[in-house]
Image (cartoon, helix red, strand yellow):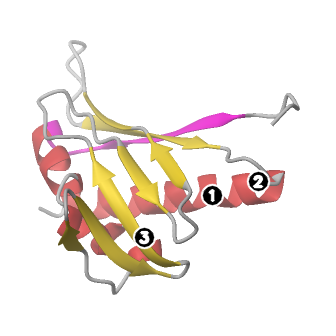
Amino acid sequence: MTDTSEMSRHVSLWIDQAPEVVYAYAADPRRLPEWAAGLAGASVEPEGEAWATDSAMGRVRIAFTPGNQLGVLDHVVTLPSGEQVYNPMRVLPGGADGRSGCEVVFTVRRREGMSEAQFEADADAVAADLATLKHRVEAV
């Protein structure tokens, strides 16, 4: 991509729940269909060192970063075309200022050939997924 349009957008929201609880919930691939709309109703199954599921696009594979204490939930989604999409995601503690809960940040990357409207739709879908995640984990 050679133009100067926006290449990444950080989509975030605060969740009124301990970061460890949010991380454990979001890090469990079997729970993805509960909060990621593109996988709603699907079953996520282990496939080698990754996880696989059927989506509206077809069969996708999802490889997560190993479990960690830093709140890193990065994952690579391999689309049916073979294209791999890197998705940085973090669960950040409320901080030393006494704020409770945590912030979840998902970086949406604009892929090659993606129009502005497609990029906006992708960011909007991520925001909706994070809102669902918030609703789910705050109810725990």
Is mark 2 in CB contact (under 8 Å) with mark 1? yes
Which circle's residue, 2 or 3, is located before the other in the chain?
A: 3
Residue under label 1, please give it: 122
Where 105 falls versus 28 (above or below)? above
In percent of the image, x 37 and y 65: which residue is there? 61
Spatial CA span between label 2 and label 1: 10 Å
In percent of the image, x 22 and y 63: which residue is there? 29
Which region is colored magenta? Answer: 7-19
Element carrying mark 2: loop
Type of amino acid at the residue the image marks with label 3: Val
Residue under label 2, please give it: 114
On the image, the x and y values in percent for residue 75 come to 35, 47
Check residue 15 for magenta coloring: yes
Q: Which mark is residue 140?
A: none
Which circle's residue, 1 or 3, is located before the other in the chain?
A: 3
Residue under label 3, please give it: 60
Type of amino acid at the residue the image marks with label 2: Met
On the image, the x and y values in percent for residue 37 come to 44, 73
In percent of the image, x 40 and y 76: which residue is there? 39
Spatial CA span between label 2 and label 3: 19 Å
Which circle's residue, 2 or 1, is located before the other in the chain?
A: 2
Where 36 falls versus 72 (above or below)? below
Q: Label 2 crowding class (10 Å Cα cut-off): few <14, some 14-19, many 20+?
A: few
